[in-house]
Structures are given as C-alpha cells and as structure tokens.
Image (tube, rainbow, N blue to C red):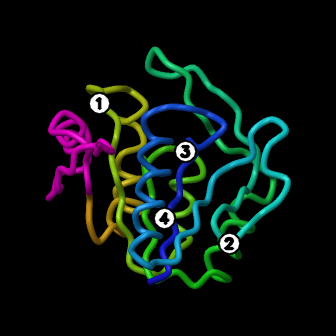
Amino acid sequence: MRIGIVSQAYYPRYGGVTEHVHHSAAELRRRGHDVTIITGRMGGHGAGASPELERVGRNVLVPFNRAFVDVTLGLKLKARLKAMIRDYDFDLLHTHCPTAPTLPMLAVQSASCPQVGTFHTASGRSRLQDAFHPYLNRTVVSKLRERLAVSTVARDSAALYFPGEYTVIPNGVDV
C-alpha cells in the first residue's frame, strides 16, 4: 500500500508528534508499505527530496497555547501540495493534527484518496476554534474516513468541536 503521512512537526524539530510520525512510518515500511512523509522545510534543512520524505513550503515557529508550533508557509503551498499528493497517488493519506493551519488542513482538502486524521492536541474551548470550527468541520473533518486520538484527553478535546467517533490509539513505546 502507498501511504502518505502529513505532519508540520518533523525532524530536525524534536517532539512527540515528530517521534510518533517517524516511528509509525518506520513500522509501516517494515511491514512492506511504501510510506512518504510530507512536511515543511525547516531552516537550512530539506533541500533534497526522496521517496521517503518530501518537504514543501517553509516552517516557522509560532507561539500558541503556551508552546511553539510549526506552521508551514509558502506562496504556492496549496498548489505544490496538491500536485505532490496527485503524483504520489496514495492509497491512504494519514494527516496529523488535521485541523491545524496550514499544511495539514490543506493536505486533507487536496486529497481524494481515503484519509485518516490523528488528533494530538489537548485543549479546551477557544475563540479561534469557536470562529473556525464550522469551516473546518465542513472542509476537513468531514473528509476523514477515520479519526484517531492519541489519548482520551485528545479525543475529548477534538470532540468539543468535532463530535463523532474516535479511536484512541496511545503513543507506542519501542521496548
């Protein structure tokens, strides 16, 4: 199976989502799948693409929710992302933090293959979510065939704005 995994968080930036994406991709490859991670370029990294890693746009760190998060920017980001997804012809697209602007949201909107979204965030209500959840529900969440959450807290947080069924799959540990 040809699987695309989309995440704004990836090496050289370390963190929980990065580790989750990297190790999930490695295990899927070990099981015989063709896996390509799609992420943004980060300060001096990502000049060369490979079948296992594609970088599009440029990531910047933005303070949000008492942390810094990667946001991918680019003048032709949506067009390049759409072409990349079309050219790879994925059987499945797995997007992490699917409602996050910009890369994850645009990936879900651009793909026509079956899609899975993993929700990582644990937060309460916010004015930002209050304003954008109808749009995100209509253009992003409704396109997900399966919704995953890494914890019951992440599930409950996502369900505040996007009610529905979620499968909780905790982050794994390589023992």
Residue at position x 50%, y 81% in the image: 2
Comparing labels 2 and 1, the label whose residue is closer to the camera: 2
* Quadrant of residue 117 within the rendered picture: bottom left
Residue under pointer 1:
122
Closer to the N terminus: mark 4 or mark 1?
4
Decide: marks 2, 1 in contact (CB < 8 A)? no
Going from N to C along the chain, the mark reached first, 2 or 1, is 2
Looking at the rendered structure, which numbered label has been put on residue 101?
3
Where does the magenta region start and end? 148-175
Percent coordinates x, y for residue 6 in the rendering: 53, 58
Q: Residue at x 61, y 59 (%)?
A: 38
The kind of residue tagged 2 is Pro
Residue drawn at 34 percent across, 56 percent down = 137
The residue singled out by tag 4 in the image is 108
Amino acid residing under circle 3: Pro
- Secondary structure found at label 1: loop
Tell whether label 1 touches label 3 (CB within 8 Å). Answer: no
Question: Which amino acid, by three-letter code, is at mark 4?
Answer: Val
Residue 57 image position (x, y, % from top left): 75, 51
N-terminal of the pair, mark 3 or mark 4, is 3
What is the quadrant of residue 32 in the picture?
Answer: bottom left
Front residue of 124/118: it is 118
| Mark 3 or 1: the one toward you | 1
Residue 106: image quadrant is bottom right
Q: Is residue 73 left or right of residue 34?
A: right
Other-residue count near label 3 (Cα within 10 Å), few / some / many at <14 / 14–19 / ≥20: some
- Give the number of the mark in front: 3 or 2: 2
C-alpha separation, residue under disc 2 versus residue under disc 4? 20 Å
Q: Nearer the viewer, residue 99 or 132?
A: 99
Secondary-structure class at tag 3: loop
Locate residue 71 relative to residue 174 in the image: left or right.
Answer: right
